[in-house]
Image (cartoon, rainbow, N blue to C red):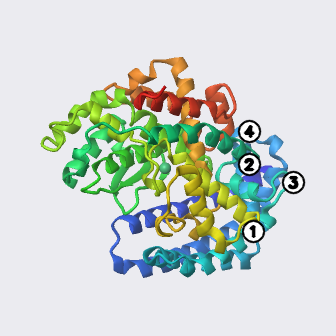
Amino acid sequence: MINEQKKKYFETREKLHALNHAFVVLGWDSETEAPIASHDKRGDVIGTLSNMYNDLLFDEKYVEAVNYLHENKAQLDPLFRREIEIVKKNLDSTLKLPKELLFENSVVCAKASPAWVEAKTKNDFSIFAPYLEKIVDISRQMMKYLETDSLKGYDVLLDQYEEGMTQAKYDEFFSLLKEELVPLIRQISEKEYSHNLKFTKLNYSIDKQKKFAKYIAEVMCFDYDRGLDKESEHPFTSGNSRYDVRLTNHYYEDMFTSSIFSMIHELGHATFEQQVSPTLDGTALSGCSAMALHESQSRFYENIVGRSYEFWQTHYSKLQETFKEELANVSLDDFYHFINKAECSLIRTEADELTYPLHIMIRYDIEQKLLNKEVEVKDLPAVWNKAYKDYLGVDVPSDTLGVLQDVHWSGGSFGYFPTYALGSAYSAQFYNAMKKDFDVDGAFGEENLGKINKWLEEHVHKFGDSKRPVDILKDATGEEFNPKYYIEYLKEKYTKLYNLK
Ligand code: ZN
């Protein structure tokens, strides 16, 4: 019986993977090179493929096979047991939700997206508010349907993005951040910035930026036989397996460092995917779906490596060589201070490493109140503006630069934001553990990052989804999540940078 059920499971898995492969390639195409006129037709194709996908997923025989294997999981080898546990959990979540609610959700989100764009463009929250009200209402209903014995309320949504994370754990994390970082940021904002900034006002050729991005890919040992990079409006990484990892970048003439750090960030995600063990290929464990863990890798490369002095000590001359005139009189020290400049600002995506987690904390705080009915949609602009004043000391001049800046809520992605800050905190914990094994800062300054990649492959990347993120962290660092490493890292770095006492 068990072999029969396995056979059924494997057959369907292969078909689901094939469709997923098609979704990834179609999505990639639409974000990068597809002609505008092809969008409608592709939308229809995706709709047809989605129906095929759902037919396979909800097929009685398949559901029966998954349930049978789950009931008999003691007989499965550990790797396959983990796969069945994940598949069963995801299947249950989908089956628990009434089809009408799922349909309503996709319709509302589809309409909310252009409404959000219009509201943001016109600085008019009232255009978006009715859609957001509906989305919040649907999310509150979904939370109820998805509750389990151990997961209630907002925890249900948090767990979807990072298995094992709860409101209690995040509350503790963010209150510590608030306590430790807010005074540090205040101290820095009182300091005068004394380094050269003139070079940041110049225009930088996009062709040269692209050339430098390729250089970065080489430094990070990205394997172009198993991956590629292109351009898109917003940088992202996607892929099908370790053999097909794709990333994008965006180039601005007047912000040349933006493409450098986006490239390092996306290459961090891409390195993770390229280093997943080949033994997991073709299984449901062959990539990492934990958001914070994934983000911990991109942020490790972007911030801890990419904004370190050691890294630029080696690579700044190449950057200077690429932009001969623009950077001729800019010292390594000026460049280093610029890429680490801390400033209380309005926009999350442009925030520096130090103030960034406060932007996330504000969103997390508002989001949980919204879902727990302590705040209503109509109050959001006022609540948002007050939080920015309280924590970052800035006045929000418009909703465009305030509550309307992020796309996430228009797609119903509640519970997503906190993984960004958690990822940064994980990355500092990995950094600390890595330092016990070798001279990490020294390795940042080597010609390429092979040594760093190797450690992360061994302790994090190779596992893909075969281990829970909390276990990967614990096994790699010797302890459970501990935010103290993140706070220590930021305090040490910025105290030095800003000559604080
Ligand atoms: Zn990322």
Q: Using the image as rendered, state which of residue 463 and residue 56 is in the foreground.
A: 463
Residue 34 x %, y %: 35, 71
| Sequence-first tag of 1 and 3 | 1
Q: Nearer the viewer, mark 4 or mark 1?
A: 1
Mark 4 = which residue? 77
Q: Name which residue lies at 54% across and 36% down.
A: 427
Other-residue count near label 1 (Cα within 10 Å), few / some / many at <14 / 14–19 / ≥20: some
Residue 60 in sight: no
- Say if 410 sits above or below 214 in the image: below
Q: CA distance from mark 1 to mark 3?
A: 18 Å
Q: CA distance from mark 3 to mark 2?
A: 14 Å
Residue 349 in sight: yes
| Sequence-first tag of 1 and 2 | 1
Other-residue count near label 3 (Cα within 10 Å), few / some / many at <14 / 14–19 / ≥20: few
Q: Using the image as rendered, state which of residue 364 and residue 232 is in the foreground.
A: 364
Residue 397 lies left or right of residue 48; in this view the side is left
Q: CA distance from mark 4 to mark 1?
A: 38 Å
Q: Is mark 4 within 8 Å of ligand 1?
A: no
Q: Amino acid at mark 3?
A: Asp
| Sequence-first tag of 4 and 1 | 4
Q: Name which residue lies at 62% across and 46% down.
A: 285
Mark 3 = which residue? 149
Q: Nearer the viewer, mark 4 or mark 3?
A: 3
Mark 2 = which residue? 166
Q: CA distance from mark 4 to mark 3?
A: 26 Å
Q: Amino acid at mark 1?
A: Arg
Mark 1 = which residue? 140
